[in-house]
Image (tube, grey):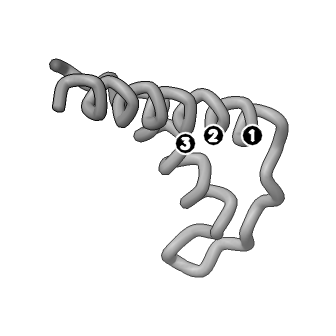
């Protein structure tokens, strides 16, 4: 089974952006896109875990 990781990686990028630039840039507050992407990523993780549970 191939697990989709696009939303997970996108959420990670947005989280790093919200945490601030590693070179000393100011953190940016999370925007609605961050929360939408995070929700989609978590849904994909949950679906993959449920699928793995069914295969066992």
- Among the 4 quarters of the image, the one containing residue 6: top left
Label ID, residue 46: none
Q: For the view shown, which residue lies furthest in the bottom direction?
A: 24
Query: In the shown orientation, is residue 22 left or right of residue 30?
Result: left
Task: Describe the element under mark 3 as helix, strand or loop.
Answer: helix
Disc 1 crowd, CA 10 A, few/some/many (<14, 14-19, 20+): some
Labels 3 and 2 touching (C-beta < 8 A)? yes
- Among the 4 quarters of the image, the one containing residue 9: top left
Q: Is residue 42 above or below residue 54?
A: below
Q: Is residue 16 above or below residue 25?
A: above
Q: Residue at x 73, y 72 (%)?
A: 26
Q: Residue at x 53, y 34 (%)?
A: 41
Label ID, residue 11: 3
- Residue 31 place in picture, x, y as percent: 82, 43
- Residue 35 place in picture, x, y as percent: 75, 40
- Residue 23 place in picture, x, y as percent: 51, 77
* Whole-number angstrom distance, CA of label 1 to CA of label 3: 8 Å
Task: Describe the element under mark 2 as helix, strand or loop.
Answer: helix
Query: In the shown orientation, is residue 13 left or right of residue 19?
Result: left
Labels 1 and 2 touching (C-beta < 8 A)? yes
Q: For the view shown, which residue lies furthest in the top direction?
A: 1
- Residue 56 place in picture, x, y as percent: 17, 32
Q: Which residue is the site of mark 2?
A: 38
* Whole-number angstrom distance, CA of label 1 to CA of label 2: 5 Å
Label ID, residue 35: 1
């Amino acid at each position: 089974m191939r697990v989709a990781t696009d939303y997970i990686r996108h959420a990670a990028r947005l989280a790093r952006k919200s945490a601030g630039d590693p070179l000393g840039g100011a953190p940016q507050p999370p925007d609605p896109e961050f929360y939408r992407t995070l929700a989609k990523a978590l849904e994909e993780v949950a679906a993959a875990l449920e699928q793995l549970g069914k295969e066992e």
